[in-house]
Amino acid sequence: MDDIRNIVILTGAGISAESGLATFRGPDGLWEGHRVEDVCTPEALARDTALVHRFYDERRARLREVEPNAAHEALAALDAQWPGELLIVTQNVDDLHERAGARRLIHMHGGLCSALCAACGKAKPWADPLPPATVCDGCGRAALRPDIVFFGEMPYEMDRIDEALRRADLFVSVGTSGAVYPAAGFVQTARYAGARTIELNLEPSAGSFYFEESRMGPATELVPALVRELLA
Ligand code: APR
């Protein structure tokens, strides 16, 4: 790993699984208990605002019961110590990366600990339940919604992510099924730009064959091991 300077790390629900947060797909996944169309689209928010807010209120409350695990901590240590460029891009809406201490971090699908004004676009930190029609203190409209990127909406900071992928010498994907674009396509962008690509996951993801190397196992073991290699 001597020739590596710029790193991009993509994380998904699998990195938070061992902290006790449910992943999306699979037998106990969040999408088994809910239809995506009922809780994670702009149409659902308009049609049944109370249901959508309640779904995210429950998940926000759950964050208080869980802690970052060894994988989040290892990435935070890498962030603190890596002298080159580094960007952690998470699809997760939990706050476990930042609670572990990660700073060079983008929440491309938004975050549970933020509320977004649908009228003026201002986002603000949010820790409590978010009742429908809560007033935005920026514009005064009753338009605060969960700051979650719903299906059909544009993920955050795509330009910055794309730029980092094109400069990367190493792209690592951790705990994501590779089922959702644009994140599922990051490996191709990075590889096309010349990056080495490594997947860390419990099982091969949908895009496993795009990676030069796949390491299978729990994130709390694989991530600290990779970080040790990088910092050695
Ligand atoms: N260690 C490593 N990988 C794990 C672990 C673990 N302990 N537990 C589960 N995984 C893997 C699973 O094998 C699966 O491949 O994590 C992956 C989780 O996949 P998903 O549930 O599909 O989560 P994710 O890829 O983050 O979903 C992407 O879909 O609906 C959306 O917006 C939502 O951001 C989410 C996006």
Image: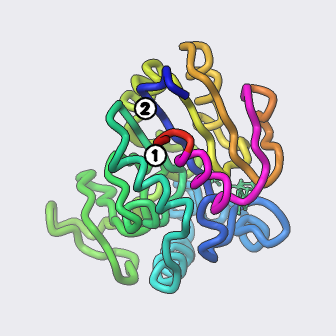
How packed is label 2: few (under 14 Cα within 10 Å), some, or many (20 or more)?
some
Considering the numbered disc 1 on the image, is that residue within a helix, a strand or a loop? loop
Q: Residue at x 55, y 42 (%)?
A: 10
Q: Position of residue 74 (x, y in %)?
A: 49, 57
Q: Residue at x 66, y 34 (%)?
A: 198
Q: Is residue 202 left or right of residue 77?
A: right
Q: Which mark is residue 108?
A: 1
Q: Which amino acid, mark 2?
A: Ile
Report, in whole angstroms, how far the alpha carbon at label 1 lies from the one at label 2: 9 Å
Quadrant housing the N terminus: top right
Q: Position of residue 96 (x, y in %)?
A: 46, 66
> Badge 2 is on which residue?
161
Q: Quadrant of residue 196?
A: top right
> Range of the magenta residues?
211-228
Q: Which amino acid, mark 1?
A: Met
Q: As displayed, is residue 103 above or below residue 192?
A: below
Considering the numbered disc 2 on the image, is that residue within a helix, a strand or a loop? helix
Q: Position of residue 156 (x, y in %)?
A: 41, 42
Q: As displayed, is residue 125 above or below residue 178?
A: below
Of 222 and 193, the residue lying toward us: 222
Q: Which mark is residue 16?
A: none
In reply to whether residue 221 is colored magenta, the answer given is yes
Q: Is residue 14 visible?
A: no
Q: Residue at x 52, y 80 (%)?
A: 66
